[in-house]
Image (cartoon, rainbow, N blue to C red):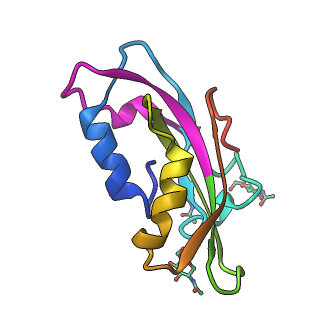
Amino acid sequence: MLLYIRHALITTIFIVVSIQQGTSIKCYVCNSNMNSSCGEIINTTAISATDCNSYNRPTQEYSYDIFCQKIKIEDAEGHNNITFMRGCSVQIPGYDACDDIESTIGRLTDGAAVVTSCVTCAHDLCNI
Ligand SMILES: *[C@@H]1O[C@H](CO)[C@@H](O)[C@H](O)[C@H]1NC(C)=O
Ligand SMILES: *[C@@H]1O[C@H](CO)[C@@H](O)[C@H](O)[C@H]1NC(C)=O
Ligand SMILES: *[C@@H]1O[C@H](CO)[C@@H](O)[C@H](O)[C@H]1NC(C)=O
């Protein structure tokens, strides 16, 4: 989410989505470009957990589930500049967070990057 390339979009999502009271999930939120502990194998000693509810924007009545996400992004040319992003995402009917980033990464990066792996999972600290 939560994420950096994705930051604008995710923020937008969280503005219209209020997390159900009592629902709570913790995820790792980091970007390997900014924190080398956030690589393919995360160093869970170095990266602290983030409570996804801290992104709550209680402006609407909607309540949707939150999940953790791990995205691998590579440069479209040589596939030698690899970035790992981890964050919180939302589960909205008809919205697939991985489909979304996979289909928008080209536009977001002017064609410079592609998503080569994206996974979501729904329990605490599962996006290792
Ligand atoms: C993981 O992070 C901890 C704390 O920053 C550090 O002491 C440790 O050496 C790191 N482990 C690896 C494998 O880099
Ligand atoms: C990596 O992130 C952790 C928090 O999750 C922070 O304590 C640490 O200082 C960061 N390391 C770098 C190099 O930014
Ligand atoms: C690698 O990609 C990131 C964005 O995904 C970019 O910020 C960075 O400048 C790139 N590094 C190189 C050496 O191209």
Confirm whether the magenta stretch covers residue 66: yes
Tell me, yes or no, if residue 21 can be seen here.
Answer: yes
Q: Residue at x 40, y 23 (%)?
A: 64
Please report the residue visible at 37 percent of the width from the left and 48 percent of the height from the top.
10
Above or below for 11 versus 126: below
The one of 77 and 34 positioned closer to us in this rendering: 77
Which quarter holds ligand 1? bottom right
Residue 14 x, y percent position in the rendering: 32, 38
Q: Within the image, what quadrant is residue 28 found in?
A: top right
Residue at (55%, 31%) from the top-left corner?
Answer: 26
Q: Position of residue 48 (x, y in %)?
A: 58, 43
Quadrant (top left/top right/bottom left/bottom right) for the C terminus: top right
Which span of residues is magenta-colored? 50-70
Horizontal and vertical percent position of residue 6: 42, 58
- Give the left or right position of residue 109, taking residue 45 as reference: left
List the single residue furthest toward the bottom. 78
Residue drawn at 18 percent across, 28 percent down = 59
Q: Is residue 57 above or below residue 29?
A: above
Looking at the image, can residue 29 be seen? no
Magenta residue check for 101: no
Q: Is residue 97 above or below residue 9?
A: above
36 relative to 2 in the view: left or right:
right
Q: Which of the two residues, 45 or 8, is positioned nearer the viewer here? A: 8
